[in-house]
Amino acid sequence: MNKKKALPIIVVLVVMLSLALSGCTSPDNSASGSQGASNGQTVIKFMHLWPEGSSNAQYTIVNKIIQDYEKQHPDIKIQTEILGNDQYREKLKVLASSNELPDVGMTWSDGFLKPYVEGQLFTPLDDVIDANLKDNFIPGVKESYAIDGKTYGMPLELNISYIFYNKELFKKYNLQVPKTYSEFKNIVKTLNDNGVIPAAVGNKEGWPGSFWFMYLADRIGGPTLLTDVIHGKRSFDDPAIVKAAEEVQSLVDMNTFEKGNSGLSNDEAKGYFMNEQAAMFLTATWELPNYTTSPDVPQAFKDKIGYFKFPLYEGGKGTDINSYVGGPGVGLFVAENSEVKEQAKDFAAFLVKEWGDKSVTDAGVIPATKVDTAGKKLDPMYVEILKDLSSASNVTTYFDTQASPNVAELHHDLIAALFGKQITPQQFVQQTAAALAEESN
Amino acid sequence: MNIMNEFAAHKRSGTISDTRVKASFGSRLGFGVLYLILGILAVIQIYPLFWLFLFSLKTNQEVFGMSPFALPQHPQWANYPKVWSQGHINLYFFNSVWYTVVAVLLTIILASFVTFAITRMNWKLSRFVLGLFIVGLMIPLHSTLIPLFNFFKHMHLINNPLSVILSYTAFNLPVTIMILLGFYQAIPREIEEAGVMDGCSVHRIFLRIVLPLTTPVLATTAIINMIYNWNEFVFVNTFISSDRWKTLTVGVNNFVGQYLTDWGAIGATLMISILPILIAFLLLSNRIVEGLAAGSVKG
Amino acid sequence: MKAVMSNKSAIALYVLPALLLILIIIYIPLVLTGYYGMMDWKGFAPMKFIGLDNYNKLIHDSMFWKSTYHSVLLGICSTFSLLIYLAVSMVLASRIKGANLFRKIYLIPMLLSSVAIAQLWSKIYDPSNGMLNHLLTSIGIQNPPLWLSDPNIVLFAIFVPIVWQYAGFYIIIYYAALKNVSEEVIEAATIDGATPWQVASRIKLPLISPVFKVTIILALVGSLKYFDLIFVMTGGGPNHASEVMASYMYGEAFSKYNFGYGSAVGFALLLICLLMTWLIRKLTTSGEDVQY
């Protein structure tokens, strides 16, 4: 009796499960593995982080390049997977842990790249670079993707940072672009006296505040200081770094930044600048479209925005105002265990090259490859900045990018604490130094 | 505790009117205060929906900096068509619906079986098995993510909706069983004793007698499961790679950029994705009451 | 009776499908996590077996204990907030006009995804432009708190949206439980002259106590492993002032690439959940109704 009654239940379950299964296992060519290509094509899996919604320009360029490549190589099919920034990072990690990386994907430089290279997940790209892109990169950029003399990534972007400012607010209070740090401090004071927030910074994630710290370290201790620290040539408890951390807190004491900045995200802080509540914003050139070409920002606002280089610190060792804090953004890697490694390398090189031609004009992104501005219609701000880039004496890659993920996380936490005055400059320096020392052991 | 006093005051007034005595001034005041509190709570709870709607019509500049109360100066209605075409919303929408429905049904059926067996039937390992389900409640999702990905990879279920549906079901079983548990325990034993007397099989007792009694709580767990599955993000993002199988929550992701996030579009996506769940909730929510009415007729 | 209700094949049929599912999807990965916890593993480079070193490190890791403390605090507060939910549910379950509407409205925040909730509350808490501080300055408070950046307040500030978000969850559970209490019992008591307060405390509460105990465990365990809103709103900051166990685990495993150590933290989280559940059971068990 009982068994007979059990039957309908089992049937229901089986039907449900099989329904679920049949719904899923139906053929899906676009998602099958690299071997399962239809009509003999080789499939290259490519994962990137420029979704159509948020990064339309980049998305469109990449799609165009893929189409061109497929046209030139009818035997190859590029299969893309697109994720947003944070999800991209998380998924890459999961994929890597299961040895399932896409054939071509995006990576960041230095500290991010290192564990992947140590895990032998990325393949060296020197041969394709030499063959296709030998002198194309801006000097020093591809080295950020090199470990032990081999290059594991081909950079796509290069950003340097400036203080962007509101010209109208400056004019209103008779302020001039500062050349020195004491002039800068006077500006802060004047703006404060008039109830304008001098500068916006969002420290929830730490890195925006780090820009201020890195520039101060560069200006006080000289342009190679932080890079030397990473390479163990100097120690993080260098007096110049202590001084830089102290200057950060004295800026905080002068009310340079909006209140509660350690709880604000970069986007939230940016709102203060975009709504003209804050007069200055230290950020990198990825923001340029907002000040030049973006259709979402009113022209009246764009016209008000100018930029200046971080001022020089009196008595500091960094005496060249053309030394920048910046660094490459994303670059392309090719997976070591890719079954179509050679084709993947060729496609990646093609993409980097084409990207360099199109990215400035079409997306407002400064590529890591040299740009020939002649004959291109560019906003004056781009022309200026590309000129700056070619006359830059030094670009210090962001400290958090250069450091290991461990130290980078700690650095972000400590920067937020430094801006929030929860720790002293000495503690800031000691804790970072301790973490760096632990790693080198 | 204030609310409790209000409640007592109200109950007093309720019984007085039940016995057809005219309500005193004091109780009417208590009643007024009670409604005021309920009303304020309601405004606090419903405001986000209104806020989200405004949010979906704003530009990034208005989202940040301007007061959240402020109305959008030039409502960005274009966010909606943009989301529809660029966010693949139309495609994701269908996936969200059927993953949610299948997973909810599967969870509720399996959980009812288990709860019935544990609370009403006699077997040695019942407490141990219950323990297993309860401990399942305590496992943080992220700590299983990498092993789980490996498992699905070996089963060739990566980029297959089954991986998502099975994960939803497994991770929702503990909480569903926990909720059902309290209700099953409250059902008087006499009910199934009567069934046994009448010579019913165990399946008949379960399907015809006990299960119908639990309709209201089934509706409750269905709502809860639905909300969880509908808003779930991590599993879909990790196990699914092709657009074809992604869901609405991942659609939001399409507007989070490397350096620029389109908040208005995110608002519009969220707004579109909340409507179906809201409707489903309103319908199911009535089922709770109907189920109760049906139950009380039988009881 | 006994024979029918101990039918082995029926039990197997009812229990096995679900049991298999959680064994495969939850327990096998869990065992693997415990195993990874004994490794020095970055997530992809070769693993190195280090025995209990990670657990040893954990015991001496002040940041882990700080995050545990925050989680436990959150758990205790959430448990107490159940009383508010219960009170509201009792009001709604009594026959007042509009109860149905209110009940539905109260659940709305739960329908929103964490992204939306985090955005909303960031707007409320924004130090200068936020709703809350606008309100406070307009009633004459000069220096309103910097909600999400003041380490002394941030945990409390995060707790409020959590209470708000989960209100609907518990209210519909309590509501269904209260509605299950037979009307005749209440009417009988009322006729016998019981005051509404007595009806509530002597009849309704005892009858729904199994449900209440279950919700205590749900609330406690839920907040011990709570992650979503904290991760989006503060990322555990500033300076770990709102770090909880789950965000700490995530940070170690996914941001710092210490997958081995992160797994150990995840495993410790499970043990602490078990311990707390056991404590709650000890505290709430009365008489023979020991079922779980």
Image (cartoon, helix red, strand yellow):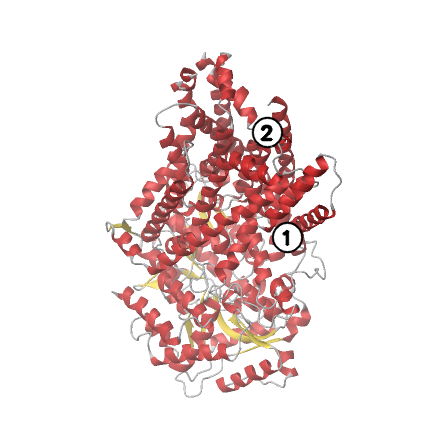
Q: Is residue C96 visible?
A: no
User: Which quadrant would residue B133 be assigned to in this image?
Assistant: top left
Q: Which mark is residue B44?
A: 1
User: Mark 1 Cα within 10 Å, few/some/many (few <14, many 20+)?
Assistant: some
Q: Which mark is residue C185?
A: 2
| Residue extending furthest toward the bottom | A315
Callout 2 secondary element: helix
Camera-side residue of C208 and A114: C208
**Residue B260: x percent and y percent?**
56, 61
Q: Are marks 1 and 2 in contact (CB under 8 Å)?
A: no
- Front residue of C54/C77: it is C77
Q: Which mark is residue B185?
A: none
Foreground residue among B140 and A99: B140
Q: Residue furthest front?
A: C193
Query: Which residue is painted at 35% across and 42% down in the image?
Result: C30
CA–CA distance in space, label 1 to label 2: 35 Å
The residue positioned 47% from the left and 75% from the top of the image is A390
Quarter of the image containing the C terminus of chain C? top left
Q: Image check: A333 left or right of B6?
A: left
Position above or below: C176 against A421: above
Name the residue type under label 1.
Ile
- Please report, as a chain letter, where disc 1 is located: B
The crowd level at tag 2 (other Cα within 10 Å; few <14, some 14-19, many 20+) is: few
Residue at horizontal 37%, vertical 64%? A110
Image point 37% across, 31% down: which residue?
B127
The reply to whether residue C285 is visible in this rendering is yes
Instruction: State the quadrant of the N terminus of chain C.
Output: top left
